[in-house]
Amino acid sequence: MAYYNKLVRDKIPELLELAGKKGTFRILGDKEFESELKKKLAESVKEYREAESESDAAEELAGLFEILISLTKVHHLSLRELDEIRQEKARKHGRFHERLFLIKVED
């Protein structure tokens, strides 16, 4: 028996059953769900950073996007609202197109 104690995707119970296994699950409350999404975000960022191929990186980015969609809902935002916030931040501070790397700032 293996213990995971982590947030999983909705189809995991079905996939476990198809594999002849039985999982034990519970439904998370709002605050705990947000906390577990944040843990999942950190885990997925780590996996993205460790990806060794373009296809692995793409899969991890897709997972990150799924987590961001869920976090957007947790914060009662639509994807359109999130994109508007992103665009406003880009207007004020720019994007990352120039690949600028700040070394130091002198007073």
Image: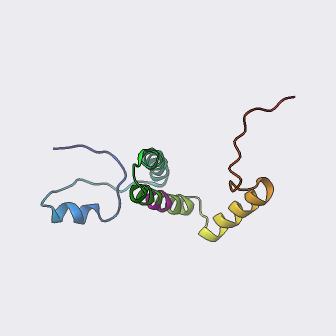
Looking at the image, the residue that sits furthest to the top is 107
Q: Kindly indicate the quadrant of the structure image that contains residue 2.
A: top left
Residue drawn at the location 78% of the way across and 60% of the way down? 91
Residue 21 is situated, as x and y percent measured from the top left of the image, at 15, 57
Color style of the picture: rainbow
Q: Magenta: predominant secondary structure element?
A: helix
- Relative to residue 79, is residue 64 depicted above or below? above
101 left or right of 65 in image: right
The total of numbered circles placed on residues is 0
Residue 65 is situated, as x and y percent measured from the top left of the image, at 50, 61
**Quadrant where the N terminus is found in the figure:** top left
Give 20 or 100, whichever is nearer the viewer: 100
- Relative to residue 89, is residue 106 depicted above or below? above
Residue 97 is situated, as x and y percent measured from the top left of the image, at 69, 56
Residue 15 is situated, as x and y percent measured from the top left of the image, at 23, 64
Looking at the image, the residue that sits furthest to the left is 20
Q: Is residue 15 magenta?
A: no
Give 20 or 56, whichever is nearer the viewer: 56
Residue drawn at the location 69% of the way across and 42% of the way down? 101
79 left or right of 101 in image: left
Q: Kindly indicate the quadrant of the structure image that contains residue 92.
A: bottom right
**Quadrant where the C terminus is found in the figure:** top right
Q: Kindly indicate the quadrant of the structure image that contains residue 14.
A: bottom left
Residue drawn at the location 84% of the way across and 29% of the way down? 106
> What residue range appears in magenta?
62-66
Give 34 or 11, whichever is nearer the viewer: 11
Looking at the image, the residue that sits furthest to the bottom is 80
